[in-house]
Image (cartoon, rainbow, N blue to C red):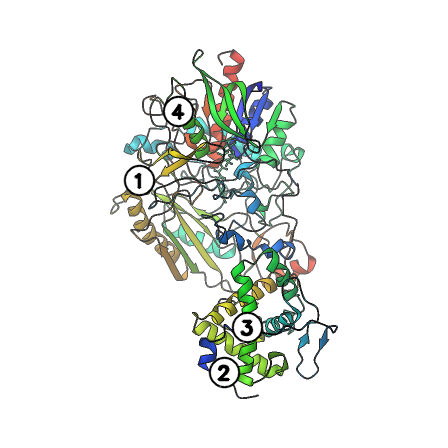
Amino acid sequence: MKQSEFDVIVVGSGITGGWAAKEFCEKGFNTLVIERGRNVEHRGPEYTDMLAPWQIENRDLIPESFSEEGRYPHILGKGYLRNSTKQFFTDEKEHPISYPEDKPFMWVRGYQLGGRSLTWGRQVLRWSKKDFESNAKDGHGVPWPIGYDDLAPWYDYVESFIGVSANKDGLDAVPDGVFQKPWEMSAPEKHIASNLAKHYDDRRLIVGRAANLTEPTQEQLELGRGPCQARSYCKKGCSFGGYFSSLSATLPAAKRTGKLTLVTDSIVATVDYDEQSGKASGVTVIDAHTKEKRSYKARVVFLCASALGSIQILLNSKSKSFPNGIANSSGTVGRYIMDHYTGVIADGEVPGFEDKYNYGRRPIATYIPNYRHEQHPGTDFIRGYGYQATATQRKNTGTTAKRVGIGAEVKAQARQPAPWRFLALMYGEMLPYYDNVASLHPTKTDQWGIPLLHIDATIKENERKQIRQATKDIKEMLEIGGCTDINLRVVPETEHIKIGDRIHEMGGACMGDDPNTSVLNKWAQAHDVQNLFVTDGACMSSCATQNPSLTYMAITARSANYAAKLLESGEL
Amino acid sequence: MKDLKITRRVFLGGLGASAIVVTAPVLASVVNADTGIQQVTKAGQFFTANELTVLVDVAEIMIPRTDTPGATDVHVMPVLDAMMLTWAGDSTKSQFKALVQQIEQLAKNSFEQEYIQLDQASRNLLISELDKRAFANTKTDLSENYREFKELVFHIYYTSEEANPDYKVIPGGYRGDITKLELIEINKRGYL
Ligand SMILES: Cc1cc2nc3c(=O)[nH]c(=O)nc-3n(C[C@H](O)[C@H](O)[C@H](O)COP(=O)(O)OP(=O)(O)OC[C@H]3O[C@@H](n4cnc5c(N)ncnc54)[C@H](O)[C@@H]3O)c2cc1C
């Protein structure tokens, strides 16, 4: 076995791994980033963003052979999986997971350098004070060991670096931060926002907060990033560096320090534990191609392999002291799996804007933040939901291929501007349930011999109640907003909602003060193994309603800063 | 316009077995002066010349040239022909081949003529009728083949450069509250 030594090993190069790498490299530590996927060059041949729609192979349709061969079984047909983006999504057929037959689970991954930072939706919302207090307040899950105030300076720090275009809305539910110029709302969105503000004290429609640059700072320009061009091609990669990704921002920042070593195509199978020192000694990887094993040593290990990726590594890292997986003396590694979920989708026409049009493609939607942290009279559930919503584009009546009709008239009709429509998707807070659990499959393994993750997770009665109320609420809000022809698509009461579908999977190595009930302390440092940190979504003790990646980044930067101090002081 | 003799039976079945004799293309591309049909003379990567002749014509009937380009102008069929190798699965491949045969058979059953011998009005009528039936009775092979083909023709047409003269690969910014006049001005300028 070959061995190499570093100050810090960071597992994963996605949103959180990129941050850990940047922080440690900038502080002068020799840092090894280990990525299981292939190398991807920023502005390299895999980016398809400079192609016009008519230049994209197969006019952006996914080859039909994919469905014939059962590839991408869960995400085939999703809007984000196109011919021009498919290289950045992992084929679940090649990388299977396991779940109970009646409770399918989705794990949308991006096994490549940069991870899902290449394909994410870039909606960046701070969590509120109340979000961090919820577990303690209602007794679900593990009480958070940190609060909003602990993270606030780190939110500032992260936002300043990544660049967030947003409006200062002055709302407690999504605190304001360090923002660049916001995106404009469309005329109908402004109308709905103003109607809601007139009618409700607690409900607002705000323009989304995007990790897309509108006023790049000197630091961002120096990293080769420029303003977003409103193409909405983000999932194809961005040659302008207009949106935040590991490839456009954190990894270049880490590289320029000269302290970064990057290995790709190397799957971390285990964190290795040294029984004598009681610390992690490093990691063992399996070469993705040759399947050869090798080990790397370091003083500190940061797991940033995404929530489920890190859980898989923890559970697979068995030793005499940790027969059920490293840092698992509490037995809670893999427990409290959460995701947001969509129980209702509503859309409606917004009349009165026949003479209003849009130009360009705004790279972010609008948002209705959670207004139900407290129970309202007449409701019998806890916690709440927000809505991702949008009316960015005025469409044409469009093609009629799916309807009867051909010829000149139909063609002329297709070019007519259609009425504006507004769309809203509920994003509900799923409670942290102890029995929503990810474990290692007892017999099935992947092609590298690593046990498959078996994920058994579902929403329960509290979430069903949320859906019922969210359906009433959104109908009312669309009416008050001024919409007509309102359609509601509600998930039937008995239908399983695939957890993971919102791609905000969290939990599994929750933070908490009590080592008996949680895996990580307030620094996202393992209670059991002091030089092991898990700073991706696994560390989240509740899931709130906001898109979580900004919070992962803030936690990662904060933890890296803390670990750096311990390294400097010689404690680690 | 000729009487339409398309029967229910024609649309509901019995078309599977009839084979089309494919003749090798020997002539350069010509437009038949009588029928207006554009006779394709060179086989594509997937479709034969005869198949292309029929499908090019059907696509043009679906999306004819008007004050804006038609399906032929934007090369819908050459694009689709290439996509048959890079995109289409086995079932689509056989569906589109079968569709040509089915259209040929329809022409014979309805007009007692080869499709390519029909005049423009008859071809328009035949395909319009096929379009209606394909949505009224969705379960037949013919309906399914036709609808799938129509979807591709529309998709390729509406993602073409010619069908999107104002599309900007790099808009440079977003405005969500502008009038038509303002939009026209911006599009004319080419930037915000
Ligand atoms: C379509 C889409 C839209 C989204 N929209 C939003 C949004 O608007 N806002 C938001 O906040 N979030 C959004 N997300 C979620 C967001 O992408 C994730 O929360 C975020 O990327 C998580 O960061 P991470 O570093 O934990 O994981 P990732 O970015 O997934 O990176 C993990 C990395 O670890 C690597 N890895 C995994 N296992 C191993 C191993 N064993 N060894 C070595 N390397 C390993 C992976 O290959 C990957 O590169 C979206 C995601 C998608 C796909």
Label number found at residue A325: 4
Mark 4: secondary structure: loop
Q: Chain of mark 3?
A: A
For the residue pair A358 and B98, the one nearer the viewer reads as: B98
- The answer to whether residue A71 is above or below residue A397 is above
Q: Are marks 2 and 3 on the same chain?
A: no
> Disc 4 marks which amino acid?
Gly
Disc 2 and disc 1: Cα gap in Å?
66 Å
Residue A488 visible in image: yes
- Graded by Cα atoms within 10 Å as few (under 14), some (14 to 19) or many (20 or more), the crowding at tag 2 reads some
**In terms of secondary structure, where does tag 1 sit?**
loop
In the picture shown, does residue B88 fall above or below B69? above
Query: Label 2 belongs to which residue?
Result: B6
Q: Which residue is identified by label 1? A: A374
Viewer-side residue, B150 vs A341: B150
User: Residue A322 appears in which quarter of the rendering?
Assistant: top left
Q: Secondary structure at mark 2?
A: loop
- Give the vertical position of A293 relative to A351 (above or below): above
